[in-house]
Every structure is written in C-alpha cells, then in structure tokens.
Amino acid sequence: MSSNLRIRFIHPNANGRGREPLEEVLAHGSKKLAFACAFITDAGYAIISPYLVNRINKPGSFGVISIQDPTSYKALKDMFLKYPKNTYVHLGTIFDHYEVGNYFGLMHSKLFLGSDGITTKVFCGSHNLTASALLGFNMEAATLTEGPANDPFFIEVEAHLEDCKSKSSDTLPEPADLDNRLIIEVEVDDPLEFIQQLKRGYFIKFLPKGTKDQPKLKPTSKFTICLFKKGTLKPNEPAPFADACINGITTAQNLGRKNPLQGVDASFSSIKFTITETQEDIFELCNGNTGAEDALSAVLKPTKWGPCDHVYFQRKPNREIDIKNLLDSIIRNAKNDLNSDSDFQIKRAPEPAIDEDLKIYFKENPSVIDSLLSRRRYWISRWKRKSKD
C-alpha cells in the first residue's frame, strides 16, 4: 500500500460513533462523491441527505443501495426522485440456488468515497446507513483512509464502486413488485367449503416449530394461506395450483403475556382456527384455538379469501416464457386460460451477462423451472402472477 496514505481506525471503542468520520468523507466529496451501502433507513438517509445536495450530481458521483430489508423504500424513492441519474438500486438474489457470479447475491458493501480532486477520503467498514450503526448503538468497525486522489488505492476503490453500480438497476421497482409475503401451504378436506366458514372478525393462530422466516411474522406483515385438497401436497415436490387462498396480515407475535408485540387489534377470543406444524414443513389446519403458545406463535387476521387466482413463487421469475410454461403446466387440467402478454410483464433492468448465463443454464437444466414453485409448505414469496381472469 502506498506510503502516501493516512489510515485511521474507527473506533477502538466498539460502540464508537461512526457518524462523524463518515460525514467527514461525505463533506470532502466536493468534486466526486460515490458510495455503495447495503442498507439505508429513514434515519440514515436524514444523516447523509445534506451531503448529497450539490455533490451526488457531479460527474462520476453516484450512490448504490440494496433494496433488501431493512432498507427504507421511502428513502430510496426520495433519492431516485431527487437524483434520478445518479441513484442505483441493487435488487439482490434472482435464483438463490444458482450462482455464476456475485451479482446473484446481496450487495453487502459499505464503502464511501469523497474527493475534492486533489485528495480523496474513503470510509470502509461494517456500518450501514442506519441510526443504530452510525450513532454507536451497534458494535461496528471501520477505517478512514486519506491520500492523493491519484493513488492506486483509490483507483481500486472506485473500480469496486463502479462494479456495484454496473450490477444494479437505475430503475426503482414499484412497491407492488416488492410484496414480501409469508406463504403457508396446507391441506383441508374441501378448500372451497372451508373458506365459506370464514367470517369477518375471525382470527387464525399459527404455531410453527422452527425459526425459519420468523422475522416475516412481525405485526402488519402480509400472509397467504394456500389451501389444497387432502393428499395433494407431496414432500419435496413443487406444489400444484391452490384451490383457495386466505390473505391477510399478522396482527400479533408471541402470545406470551410478557411480550410487547402481543396484539395489534388481535382478539384472542376470536381465534377460530389453528395451523400447527406437525413435522418440519408439514402443516395441519383444525378448528378452534388449540395448541400451546410459545415464542414463535402468531395470530393471523384474514382480510380476503376465495378461490385462488394467483400463483406464488419462491424466487424471482427471470423470463416471460418461463412463467408462461410454468403456469401452463399448472393450470392445464383446470382448463384456465393465460392472460395476455401484458399481464406477465416483469420490471427488470437489462443485465446482459446474467441473461446469457441464465439462457445457457435453462437450456441445460429445463427442470429448474419447477423450482419457481414452493417445495416447502412455509416460506416467503416476493413474486406472484395472476393465473386466470
């Protein structure tokens, strides 16, 4: 490393504040300001906002943020509105079982570069753009490096930032495309008859065994219960098209009396059904409020139910033809027609290298299309497509 560089460690105190050294770098970016940071919250955006004005629009300046939780969509949207030509969003995993390059994983860098054209400063560490990270609540570590702007070290930093940008999108997806929904697949004797029992004000208790996807059970998170006829779901096989669905929100988590999240308009006396995980990823739905609550218990509030007209995916469908082929195979026996091409549009920035890799991958592994459907009975989906009129 060049002897012209001066490096400071932030901080020997693991709970030291990262805000001030980060602001030093941001303020130094009068000629160029570029950064890539995994997550940004509203509080973090409030900290960096004053430094974006008159800096982020300079030539060579830009910011890249990952769209994954806990990033604030509101903060991202404001950045895109104010700095549309210099803001980029990394969309994360497309297929989490297929990794040709690192563009399929999470953009997890926390790297900030500010230059006045003569000297450059770089803040690199574990800090995300959140209050917990920057104000000393978390234990974080970082370095602040300063030196001549033409030093090879800074050229490599800029190369990394440019690479993050190249693997991100200059278009922010609409909120509807970011629906992060808990999916529970369960069998009943007659799905259509079951949903006729539901009434406004009924609640469903959910008792999973493990911790998988547990953060999505927090109050106000969305859920869908997909109902299938008995004998339909096969272990380790994709689910067929559901007969009926129950949609709603999680209203309480952990029914223990000491838990502060115990109830957001949840009425425990109105629990009419219970979903229990009898073994891993196998669920049973029964009448009444049964089973013992524990730290993983949740209350689900149905808001809408009826015959299922959507198919849910574990992973983001990459190409229109994959969706159509998949849906065609699912609903062929049900004699449902696919909608027009316009109903299957996917908002996704062009990524030539990824597209070519996937084209080859699908050609060599046609069965991978099946993995777009759940092989588990309890999972998270961000993607759904309407299957019939």
Image (cartoon, rainbow, N blue to C red):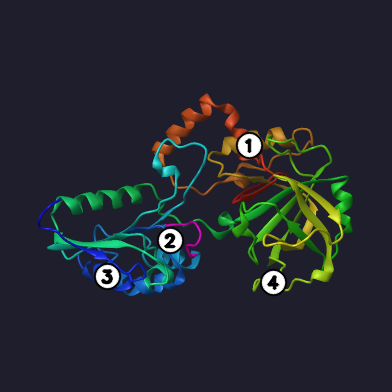
The image shows residue 175 at horizontal and vertical percentages of 55, 60
Q: CA distance from mark 3 to mark 1?
A: 51 Å
Identify the residue at the far left of this view: 4
Q: Report the residue marked by disc 2.
A: 39
Residue 389 percent location from the top left of the image: 74, 47
Q: Amino acid at mark 4?
A: Gln
Q: In this figure, which residue is indicated by the disc labeled 1?
A: 324
Q: Residues within 10 Å of mark 1 (few under 14, many from 20)?
A: some
Instruction: Tell me the quarter of the picture where residue 121 sits.
Output: bottom left
Give the Cα distance between marks 3 and 4.
40 Å
Q: Nearer the viewer, residue 329 or 15?
A: 15
Kindly report which numbered mark, 4 or 2, lies closer to the viewer in this rendering. 4
In this rendering, the label closer to the viewer, 3 or 1: 3
Magenta-drawn segment: 66-72
Label 4 secondary element: loop
Which residue corresponds to mark 3? 21
Which quadrant would residue 229 be assigned to in this image? Answer: top right
Towards the viewer: 129 or 115: 129
Callout 3: few (<14), some (14-19), or many (20+) C-alpha neighbours within 10 Å? some
